[in-house]
Amino acid sequence: MEQRSELHHTEEANYYKKPNIFSFIISPIKQFDRIRYEPKALGPMFLILAIVLIGLLIPVLAGQGGLVPSQTGEFYGEDMYMDDYYYEPDPLSSMNIDSFVTNAIVWLSVLGVFAAVPPLLSLLFFAFAKMHNRDTTYGTLYSMTVFATLVVGVGFLYVMIMNTIAGTYGYMYTAPAVFVNQEHLLYPFLASLEVSTLLFILLIVIGLIRTAAFERFVAIAIGVGMFAVVFIFQVVGGMM
C-alpha cells in the first residue's frame, strides 16, 4: 500500500511540470511520467532534426569531398609565382557543386527518415494500445517516441563527427561491428548492437510501461520485435 501511495504522489508531483527534452538524458523516467499527463513533441522534434542537420553538415564542410575542398601545400608548384598565391580566387569559387547537389538528396532522405519514423512507430504503438485496451492517446505515444529518438540523433551526430575526424565514410563507431570486416559472419549481429539503437529500444520499452501503462511482458515483447527488425535490416543490407 505504501509503495502505491508513493508512486501516486510522484505522479501527482510530475503532473504540474512539463516534460523537458534537455533533461531527458539524465532523467528519462521522470520525463516519461510527465509526458503521460502533458505530451510535448513539436519543439523536441525540431531539436532532434537540428542535431541531425548539424551531423550532416560537418562532413560536408570539413570532410573529404566536402563542399569547400581543403587546400594543401602540394597544390602550388615550385615554379609558381608568389603573386599567383596571393591573388588566388576565393576558395568558395571552387565549390564542389555537383557533389553538393547529389548529396543533398541523401541529406534530405536522412532528415526525412528521422521525421517520419516517430509518427509511424507511434501509430504502431497506438494500435497495440487499443488491442490491449490501454487508456492512452496517439499524441502521448508520439511525444514518448520523439523523446526516445533524441539518443539516436545524438548517436548520429557522434558517428558523423568521428567519421569526419578519421577521414572515413560509413563507419559505425558506436557498434562493435567496427572491429570486423563486413564479410565477417557475425557482422550483421554486431552491427545490430549499435549503442544508440539499443538505448532507443530500451527507452521505448520503459516509455510504454511508464507513459502508456503497458504490461511489462507486452512492452518487452515489442522491444524484442524492434531489435529483430533491426537485425533483419542489417542482414538484408549485408546481402545487397
Image (tube, helix red, strand yellow):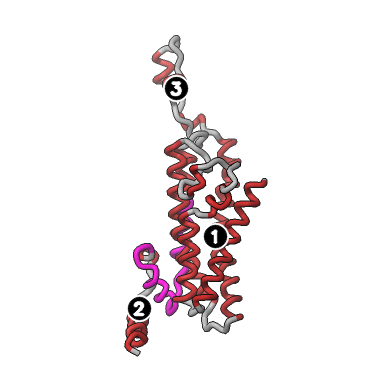
* Element marked by disc 3: loop
**Disc marking residue 14:** 2
| First in sequence: mark 1 vs mark 3 | 3
10 Å neighbourhood of mark 2: few (<14), some, or many (≥20)?
A: many
Q: Do the residues labelled 1 and 3 touch (CB within 8 Å)?
A: no
The picture places residue 6, in percent across and down from the top left corner, at: 32, 84
Q: Which of 128 and 82 is in front in this view?
A: 128
Q: Which of 219 and 108 is in front in this view?
A: 219
Cα distance, mark 1 to mark 2?
28 Å
The picture places residue 216, in percent across and down from the top left corner, at: 49, 76
The picture places residue 48, in percent across and down from the top left corner, at: 46, 58
| First in sequence: mark 2 vs mark 3 | 2
In the rendered structure, the answer to whether residue 13 lies left or right of residue 223 reads left
Q: In this view, does 207 lie above or below 76?
A: below
Q: In this view, does 235 lie above or below 200?
A: above
Q: Mark 1 points at which residue?
A: 115
Q: Which residue is depicted at the point 54% across and 33% down?
A: 96
Residue furthest front as drawn: 185
Q: Disc 2 residue type? A: Asn
| First in sequence: mark 1 vs mark 2 | 2
The picture places residue 193, in percent across and down from the top left corner, at: 50, 54
In the rendered structure, the answer to whether residue 220 lies left or right of residue 72 reads right
* Element marked by disc 2: helix
Q: Disc 3 residue type? A: Glu
If the image is split into quadrants, where does the N terminus sit? bottom left
Q: Name the residue under label 3.
A: 88
Q: Disc 1 residue type? A: Ala
Q: Nearer the viewer, residue 203 or 101?
A: 203
10 Å neighbourhood of mark 1: few (<14), some, or many (≥20)?
A: some
Q: Give the magenta range.
A: 25-53
Q: Within the image, what quadrant is residue 184 found in? A: top right
